[in-house]
């Protein structure tokens, strides 16, 4: 969708979508230009500022990112997207209590906020609060059955509970769903590469795991986990 004479509100929304597409391609320079132009056209809206926050987060500049989230919060304090972005920054800072508080707020404002539930579940699993994590895991698995990231979290909880066969079955299901996607899409979709690498590692399929993680690192060279 190319820029055109659509009026500032529609044009800003198009620019916001374009910025998100550039972020998915890890083209942060073009993403920033799109979000800044959207912010110029819609000065009273939070979404361009949240886009800029995500852009700076991807570059590791969490202070700048948090500044944009604070500006967005001043405009729309009851926007679940604001609290989700704040949670992601807290999580990147390894501030688990702060991240949980912000994820909770995002979910209070929007019960079906799947990314916030995934983020909260991930921290709860990390903290070994598995019973609490299962609330979000089961919610996401019921309402977004093709969401493969939740399968990995579920497998960890099941493994800790001694349900090894169930955990392996869930990982196999997630891996099959990912491999049914267009191979060209997977090659250029960082989160799918990372998840396939992690699943391969969990299943001790190290050759596949290395292949996917090696590809992922080209998108995110400083990702310590991969």
Image: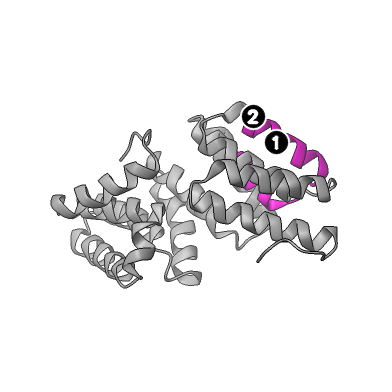
The residue that appears at 73% across and 51% down in the rendered structure is 79
Whether residue 82 is visible, yes or no, is no
Q: Secondary structure at mark 2?
A: helix
**Badge 1 vs badge 2, beta-carbon distance below 8 Å:** yes
Q: Residue at image x 65%, y 66%?
A: 1
Residue in the foreground of this view, choosing between 41 and 88:
41
Residue 92 visible in rendering: yes
Q: How would you rate the neighbour count of disc 1 (Cα within 10 Å): few for under 14, some for 14-19, many for 20 or more?
A: many
Query: Mostly what secondary structure, the magenta segment?
Result: helix
Mark-to-mark CA distance, 1 and 2? 7 Å
Helix, strand or loop at mark 1: helix
Q: Which residue is mark 2?
A: 64
Is 201 left or right of 57, judged from the image as shown? left
Left or right: 102 with respect to 163?
A: right
Image disc number at residue 52: none
Name the residue: 46% across, 50% down: 121
Looking at the picture, how far across and down is residue 27, in whole percent?
52, 46
Q: Where the C terminus falls, by quadrant? A: top left
| Residue 74, magenta (yes or no) | yes
| In this view, 162 is above or below 219 | below
Mark sitting on residue 68: 1
User: Where are the magenta residues, as a range?
Assistant: 64-87
Question: Residue 224 magenta-drawn?
Answer: no
Residue drawn at 82 percent across, 43 percent down: 75
């Amino acid at each position: 969708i190319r820029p055109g004479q659509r009026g500032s509100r529609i044009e800003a929304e198009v620019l916001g979508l374009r910025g998100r597409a550039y972020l998915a391609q890890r083209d942060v320079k073009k993403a920033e230009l799109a979000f800044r132009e959207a912010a110029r056209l819609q000065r009273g809206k939070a979404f361009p500022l949240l886009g800029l926050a995500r852009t700076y987060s991807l570059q590791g500049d969490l202070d700048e990112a948090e500044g944009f989230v604070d500006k967005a919060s001043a405009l729309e304090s009851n926007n679940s997207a604001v609290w989700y972005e704040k949670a992601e920054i807290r999580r990147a800072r390894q501030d688990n209590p702060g991240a949980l508080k912000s994820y909770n707020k995002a979910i209070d404002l929007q019960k079906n906020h799947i990314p916030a539930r995934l983020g909260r579940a991930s921290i709860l699993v990390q903290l070994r609060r598995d019973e609490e994590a299962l609330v979000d895991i089961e919610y996401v698995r019921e309402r977004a059955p093709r969401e493969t990231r939740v399968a990995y979290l579920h497998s960890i909880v099941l493994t800790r509970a001694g349900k090894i066969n169930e955990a392996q079955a869930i990982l196999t299901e997630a891996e099959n769903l990912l491999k049914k996607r267009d191979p060209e899409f997977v090659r250029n979709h960082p989160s799918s590469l990372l998840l396939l690498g992690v699943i391969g590692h969990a299943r001790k399929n190290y050759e596949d795991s290395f292949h996917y993680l090696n590809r992922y690192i080209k998108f995110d060279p400083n990702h310590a986990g991969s």
